[in-house]
Image (cartoon, rainbow, N blue to C red):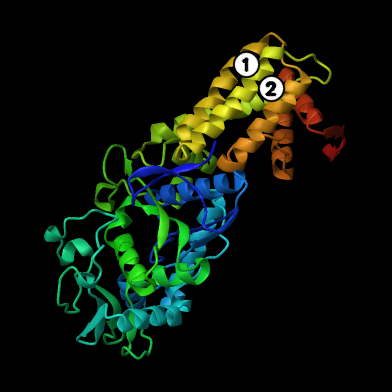
Amino acid sequence: MALKLFNTLTQQLEELRPLHEGEVRMYTCGPTVYHYVHIGNLRTFVFQDLLRRYIRYRGFRLLHVMNITDVEDKIIARAQEEGVSIQDYTRRFEEAFIEDMEILRIQQPEVMPRATEHIPEMLDLIRRLQERGNTYQRDGSTYFSIGTFPDYGKLSRVDLSQVDAESTGEEDEYGKENPRDFALWKRRRPEEAFWDSDFGAGRPGWHIECSAMSMKYLGESFDIHCGGVDLIFPHHENEIAQSEAATGRPFVRHWVHGAHLIVEGEKMSKSKGNFFTLRDLLDQGHNPQALRYLLSSVHYRRQLNFTFQGVEQAQAALQRVNDFLQRIREVPEGRPDDPPLGSAIERARRDFEAGLDNDLNTSEALAALFTLIKDVNILLDEQRVGSQDREAILKLFSDADRIFDVFQVEEPKLKDAQIEALIAERQQARQERKFDRADEIRNQLVERGILLEDTKEGTRWKKVN
């Protein structure tokens, strides 16, 4: 089997065959750090994390670049409102994004370049376009003329006759010859952050940032470019136009886009009160692993309806897996194996990998695991799971967790605060003469390597092998 991904450019499922033998080069659109990212953004980032993990699981080396957009209209406006530099304004939201990634166990890419640190590369790219006749200036700004790029629209298949300034996201105060053109370099406005250049004082347009940074670290042609479906037009369409016009080479081989997230059946909106950041959900007491599982459980090209009932169901599904893994760990050494079970474990692994090979179909992959859990739980009741089967099952779930990163494959270790809480609960149980519960806690701690000693001064504990 081989990993196949749906390519937005060709509208086909295509095998991933990297340009550089054994190494995949991937660019994913990162956050625009003017506020905390919301759960719709996080769904995209989780999908991209699953993809990067599975690429590596399949044995490829990976060079993954995710940009940080730290200069654009909203950032400039809000920094001005607060009377701070754009760097001071954006850093706190960039740091918050890194924290969100850590909480949701999203791996950091190999390179995370900031737009403000790559202005020279952007200007170099604009110069190349100018030399090739793809640009013009108007009122101090420099624009890309899409009329000079005959393939414009090949990604989005947009009807250019229906395109206006609003649909391109270029409805600003800068004049243009054609409403379909887009800004490469925007002239300076009063009291606005700017950079000096041979195109005049100003700042980069949004689209040029990604082209310049991706080509700096990945080359003029690379394997995968990811993002949400909302970026197909105009952002990714414009990236293709300016990149291929400048280099004369294909820009990206596989364009991979994730579907939108809705909340309780409706589009997410602050006015509807259904706009949530990760911080909002954690403040409500939701488990971050359950959130990651929920965001992972639906195929990335299908719309995900985020509901709080869905979060509860995700938590229950995780509990079912973790309870199963605990039962598997308790299978004693030396118990004989059940021959048909070995074949079932191998089949589950094949089905798991086949699901992910099929356009990263996480729902198919998870279904393979739950089918195995259902069958093995019956055998566990009958004490027909042997020690070799135990190790094979734990290996399968350990490998699955390399991608999903939500399962408790290893025995969870108690932290000191958790031990103290259990000791306090045991003391309360003894005071209430609930001796069975007190003994249960003591035995539970002994099984986890924690020995209790009741003294006149109170209960002490120590860790033992």
Residue 454: name its quadrant: top right
Q: Which residue is mark 2?
A: 327
Which one is closest to the eye, mark 2 or mark 1? 1
Is there a contact, CB below 8 Å, between mark 2 and mark 1? yes
Residue 414 in view of the camera = yes
Q: Which quadrant is the C terminus positioned in?
A: top right
Which residue is found at the position 20% from the left and 71% from the top?
147
Mark nearer the N terminus (2 vs 1): 2
Residue 242: name its quadrant: bottom left
- Judged left or right of residue 404, residue 202 is left
Which residue is found at the position 20% from the left and 79% from the top?
174
Q: Which residue is mark 1?
A: 377
Front in this rendered view, residue 375 or 72: 375
Which residue is found at the position 75% from the left and 20% from the top?
331
- The x, y position of residue 375, in whole percent, is 59, 15
- The x, y position of residue 164, in whole percent, is 14, 64
Q: Which SS class for mark 2?
A: helix
- In the image, residue 55 sits, relative to residue 371, either above or below, namely below
- The type of residue carrying mark 2 is Arg
- The type of residue carrying mark 1 is Asn
Which residue is found at the position 84% from the left and 18% from the top?
334
